[in-house]
Amino acid sequence: MDEALIGVEVVYALPDRQRLVALRVPPGTTMVEAARLSALDTVFEGLDLTSAPMGVFGKLEAEPATRVLRDGERVEIYRPLEVDPKAARRARARRAPTTGDA
């Protein structure tokens, strides 16, 4: 195994399936470069690795094209939310039974 390489993972998930790809990449590899090397865009139709939001271990990265990875990090490719979280909370609040004195 080439010791000059670092180990990273790239992951993408849909509600019904997910894929994690382990890679060995040269130091200095960015998040977007690792995502491209993972070839997940060939597995998931419509996945655009140049514009998809990405993070490392649950923390959104503002500039994945320039964010250099460190050994052991996991790149997470995020998909758009199907429902706005604030709208979902409002809808749940409207459906909740009211309790109180009548």
Image: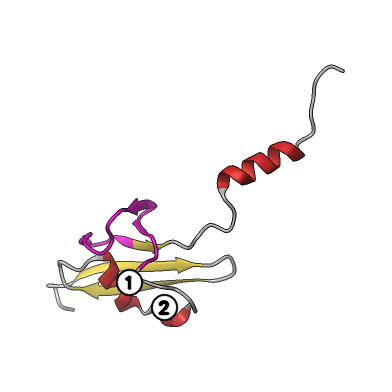
Q: Report x, y in % for residue 20.
A: 41, 71
Of the numbered discs in the image, which one, if any, rests on residue 13?
none
Return the residue found at the far right: 102
- Mark 2 vs mark 1: which is more N-terminal? 1
Distance between the Cα atoms at labels 2 and 1?
9 Å
Secondary structure found at label 2? helix
Amino acid type, mark 2: Asp
The residue at 15%/68% (across/down) is 27
Q: Name the residue nearer the viewer: 90 or 54.
A: 90
Of the numbered discs in the image, which one, if any, rests on residue 41?
2
Secondary structure found at label 1? helix
The correct choice, above or below, for 44 with respect to 32 in the image is below
The residue at 79%/33% (across/down) is 97
Q: In what quadrant of the picture does the C terminus appear?
A: top right
Q: Report x, y in % for residue 90.
A: 65, 40
Q: Report x, y in % for residue 58.
A: 39, 52
Q: Is residue 10 left or right of residue 45?
A: left
Which quadrant of the view contains residue 2? Answer: bottom left
Amino acid type, mark 1: Ala
Q: In what quadrant of the picture does the N terminus appear?
A: bottom left
Q: Do the numbered discs 2 and 1 sit on residues whose CB atoms are within 8 Å?
A: no
Magenta stretch encompasses residue 36: no
The residue at 36%/71% (across/down) is 49
How busy is the neighbourhood of tag 2: few (under 14 within 10 Å), some, or many (20 plus)? some
Q: Is residue 70 left or right of residue 80?
A: left
Residues rendered magenta in the picture: 51-74
Q: Is residue 21 left or right of residue 64?
A: right
Of the numbered discs in the image, which one, if any, rests on residue 35?
1
Return the residue found at the far bottom: 42
The residue at 61%/45% (across/down) is 87
The correct choice, above or below, for 57 with respect to 24 in the image is above
